[in-house]
């Protein structure tokens, strides 16, 4: 079964769309992008049931907290995508971090690593 990925970098919706396309071209099952704030993102996570969520730091902390507190969603992997060099110290509970901008192969490898963990 193909992994389902939701890309939600609300700080840059165009980036989210481009990244979703790159991941789809690499054979990942993207379920789309969501950039309407934390509550809309949470509803999308509940509806789409992704295996992996790529999220910006702004929404990441709250979404991770909700995921880890929801038994049926605790297994969802989360990668935080942000331009801040210190993101790994600011978003507890994330499964990984990608500092952007980065070449597409960095994102693809991070996704592979997160899904295989």
Image (tube, rainbow, N blue to C red):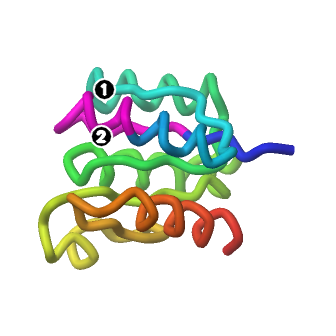
Quadrant placement of the N terminus: top right
How far apart in space, not on screen, are marks 2 and 1 (Cα)? Answer: 7 Å
Mark 2 residue element = loop
Q: In this image, 27 relative to 57: left or right?
A: right
Residue range (magenta): 6-18
Residue 41 on image: x %, y %: 41, 29
Mark 1 residue element = loop
How dense is the environment of label 1, judged by Cα within 10 Å: few (below 14), some, or many (20 and up)? Answer: some
Q: Nearer the viewer, residue 62 or 80?
A: 80
Q: Residue furthest right?
A: 1
Residue identified by numbered label 1: 35
Residue identified by numbered label 2: 9
Which residue is located at x 20 percent, y 47 percent? 58
Which residue is located at x 20 percent, y 35 percent? 12
Q: Is residue 1 above or below residue 13?
A: below
Quadrant placement of the C terminus: bottom right
Mark seen at residue 12? none
Q: Is residue 116 above or below residue 9?
A: below
Which residue is located at x 34 percent, y 36 percent? 16
Residue 66 on image: x %, y %: 46, 46
Which residue is located at x 57 percent, y 58 percent? 77
Residue 24 on image: x %, y %: 59, 38
Q: Is residue 117 above or below residue 67?
A: below
């Amino acid at each position: 079964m193909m992994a389902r990925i939701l890309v939600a970098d609300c700080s840059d919706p165009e980036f989210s769309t481009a990244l979703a396309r790159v991941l789809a071209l690499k054979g990942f099952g993207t379920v789309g992008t969501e950039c309407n704030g934390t509550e809309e993102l949470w509803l999308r996570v509940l509806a789409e049931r992704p295996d992996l969520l790529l999220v910006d730091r702004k929404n990441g902390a709250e979404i991770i907290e909700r995921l880890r507190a929801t038994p049926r969603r605790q297994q969802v992997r989360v990668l935080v995508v942000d331009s801040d060099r210190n993101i790994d110290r600011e978003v507890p509970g994330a499964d990984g971090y990608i500092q952007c901008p980065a070449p597409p192969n960095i994102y693809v490898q991070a996704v592979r690593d997160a899904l295989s963990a």
